[in-house]
Amino acid sequence: MILIHLDKNSSIPLFQQIIDQLILMIEKGNLREGDKLPSTRAFSEKLGVNRTTICRAYDELWALGYTESKQGGYSTIRKRDRNVVLTPKLNADLFDWNSHVSVGYLQLESRMNQLKMDENLNSIDFRRLAPDKDCMPVELFRKCANQIMLDQGSTVFQYGDPAGYLPLRDSIAKQMQFHSVSVQTKEVLLTNGAQNALDLVFRMLLNPRDKIAIGMPGYAALIPLLKLYQADIIPITIKEDGLDLEELEKAMISENLKAVYTMPNFQNPTGISTSQTHREKILHLCERHSVPLLEDGFEEEMKYFGKNILPIKSMDSKGIVIYIGTFSKILFPGLRVGWIAAEKKVIEKLTRIKKAGELSGDQLNQAILNLFYEKGYFDQHVKKMHRVYRKRMQITHKALSRFIPVYVKYTKPQGGYTIWFEVPAEGKSEEDFMELLANKGVLVSPGSHFLTKASESVNFRISISCVNEEEIWTGIERIGLILKNE
Amino acid sequence: MILIHLDKNSSIPLFQQIIDQLILMIEKGNLREGDKLPSTRAFSEKLGVNRTTICRAYDELWALGYTESKQGGYSTIRKRDRNVVLTPKLNADLFDWNSHVSVGYLQLESRMNQLKMDENLNSIDFRRLAPDKDCMPVELFRKCANQIMLDQGSTVFQYGDPAGYLPLRDSIAKQMQFHSVSVQTKEVLLTNGAQNALDLVFRMLLNPRDKIAIGMPGYAALIPLLKLYQADIIPITIKEDGLDLEELEKAMISENLKAVYTMPNFQNPTGISTSQTHREKILHLCERHSVPLLEDGFEEEMKYFGKNILPIKSMDSKGIVIYIGTFSKILFPGLRVGWIAAEKKVIEKLTRIKKAGELSGDQLNQAILNLFYEKGYFDQHVKKMHRVYRKRMQITHKALSRFIPVYVKYTKPQGGYTIWFEVPAEGKSEEDFMELLANKGVLVSPGSHFLTKASESVNFRISISCVNEEEIWTGIERIGLILKNE
């Protein structure tokens, strides 16, 4: 018997009140592993609320790792390794930090515990999404580093403009012009990678409970970050050409969206690229409904097959698009240099936020990277990456059509690094399936990392960024075997 | 005639409602430059609210740059260069970003506009607070950079632990042990400088309208950051030995503080160091009232006179202290490496936040810095800095007692870089005084940057970090002349 008290006059939404109270019962042990939650229909009648409110609460509980969704539609309490929110087992003498944390932090933590990775060095690892170690131009970078320190001396070690090292902002503006985006140097802000760029933009835009539409499945690390902002994620289905436009427009009309986030190239995790026409339609929707559009230009440089498609930002005449770029997925992930290209007024605002949180950018890395760019090493490197990954993706496509059974759906990316699988569940859970794969020596990224709602199928992502051609072939062969024997 | 409508049932505090409405009137032009605000007594009677509510609102308006406080106690509307919040003069075609920003951002922007600096290359510049360019060991750092890239190759360019490069965390734990702080490697998190450390801690602790006690005058860049969090700053007077303990305890009893922030060495801006006994008392207060203590270990290494005083963290048996350190004020400001030392559970929480916002630390810089430390170059550098700055501070003390008239109060720091002045106002405003100094070729940091309330005297800070002995002598001589002719 589950007792929930709802306060319809509270500023806390009903679904959130339900979540909070259910979590408390789980944490206190009043609800235990295996306990069934009422059906959404029964529960909605009992509480006198709309059934979608209950569905929403159940989805959220699942996303927080508190429940499992079983076939037949009911939810049960999951076995959990440890308590997420309330852990009152601190040494009595020590300060109890758990009762001193912010609401945003608690929301972040609940989502983050899900995202742990086991390491297994002997497996074929399709999880990593970063340029291959063997492709990194370390020697050229080292030479640039020397030259910068010799030429600039202590100048490059001073506090710098919080918007970043000016010559690199200039180089990036030029690089974006190659992609037909017309931005000036002052419309570029340097960040500590793309994740920091997202963080700055959210700080500028979001109040708690603001709504943001993102494609689902979607970029895994976006979800905990948005939890930290207590933002409300409105999931939009990713179809064969990207965001489902009908769903998006409906959300714009009914939800008072604060922003739309999209990753039009080789979307992470699906690898799907959005066509030029589709991009234009997204932009027009945002313009019509006055909703800021965040374009994550993820893997912009990794178009190694077919025709070049231009960024949405290239069509943005009203300055409604904030473009986010990074060097982490093509050059050095550990260097932490990304950027935001947006209207000057937006860059000014974001620079204030950057300054408030960090005072100054990292001048040294930015200056070295700029010299690397100016010497033409970046272009050279992009060409090399295309050669390497074009071959890898060709092998991937071949292995997929050879080894993967027909009843399994997977995407066929025209570039980038990732492929997304949809396997009919047939009673198997994602965890079971990951275990089968791991026992066979294959590590993939579980689909739930990229979702905010339970999926009817079992999903996973593979990334070919850190596996060679032989590993790709063998790895996909093993995946195929598991799928067939299942 | 000023019409204010107060909603006593609103969740927005009364002082905030008053501020919001006055700002709107100023922005709309209903209140203009030079207009007098009602006296606090008259206004409080008219609105039927406590007089302290009005005082609070007036202080805040002053801090936001909207008013001037004149002798005699009334406030007048200030001349302002541009509108802060509402600037509806965008091109009609462009997207109106100003109406899409978060509440936190608006609060940040209002405080940040105050903090602009004019550049004047021919003046003696006592404003910069960073190690002198001429003291930076660039050549040694370059050699370390080479060695790291040659030895580690692409390994150091991978995504790294979001808590930072493990060997540097280890070195920092050792360095803190020299200061009698017992922390393990896992109790150290690397950050992008101390400002990023503060940002991470605030993200963990603060909800909007949470209260935090900070010494006043206090670290200027802390104020806009706290505005971004919509935090409520409870100012505690800085006396000759640091935070006023009576005031602090009163605040702890009456205000439900979320944290206390303190900078016990060479406090910025006053240069005041807190004694060991005083440090102990602050710690005990925090323990007794269960309020987390943020110890900003600013310039920990810059104790070049007298006896070493230990960090508060060294006495922290309950894990209630979060210690923040940085290399920016002793080595390279542009390198952006700072750290947090705290109880392991706190570090785990902060690491989650760091990961959510940036995924990975900057491995390369951290690895180079670690080698620099391991080779003993850091110790060597600290000794050199002591030699240089001991002499500079001696000259400073000599020049101060020679040139500054007796009715002007100034601090006499035992290390660090900064000195704080209190000049009887006698009708002169801070702006007038800064202008007099600038005309004489001396640039100092205006006191209002370090305050949240109008001060009865004119205050300013000088920093001797980037001026040589001759400039110190001449600069202080000029300041003395202005003070005498005033």
Image: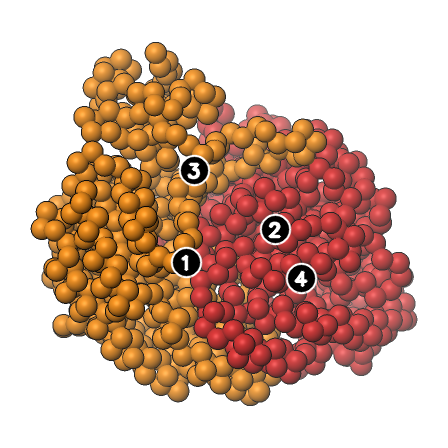
Chain colours: A orange, B red
Q: Amino acid at mark 3?
A: Ser
Same-subunit check for callouts 4 and 1: no
Whether callout 3 and callout 2 share a subunit is answered no
Nearest the camera: A221 or A76?
A76
* Cα distance in 3D space between marks 4 and 1: 28 Å
Tell me the CA gap for discs 3 and 1: 28 Å
**Contact check, label 4 and label 1, Cβ < 8 Å:** no
Report the amino acid beneath label 4: Ser
Q: From where the camera sits, is residue A425 visible?
A: yes
Crowdedness near tag 4: few (<14), some (14–19) or many (≥20) residues, C-alpha within 10 Å: some
Whole-number angstrom distance, CA of label 1 to CA of label 2: 24 Å
Q: Residues within 10 Å of mark 2 (few under 14, many from 20)?
A: some
In the rendered structure, which disc, 3 or 1, sits on the residue that comes first in sequence? 3
Of the numbered discs in the image, which one, if any, rests on residue B171?
Answer: 4
Answer above or below: position of B82 versus B482.
above
Q: Secondary structure at mark 4?
A: helix
Q: Is residue B283 above or below residue A150?
A: above
In this figure, which residue is indicated by the disc labeled 1? A121
Protein chain holding label 1: A
SS at mark 3?
helix
- How far, Cα to Cα, is label 2 from label 4? 12 Å
Q: Residue at x 62, y 63 (%)?
A: B168
**Mark 2 highlights which residue?**
B186
Indicate which label's residue lies in the foreground, 4 or 1.
1
Residue at mark 3: chain = A
Q: Is residue B424 left or right of residue B321?
A: right
Marks 3, 4: nearer the viewer: 4
Q: Nearer the viewer, mark 3 or mark 1?
A: 1
Q: Which mark is residue A110?
A: 3
Chain containing the residue with disc 2? B
Q: Considering the numbered disc 2 on the image, is that residue within a helix, a strand or a loop?
A: helix
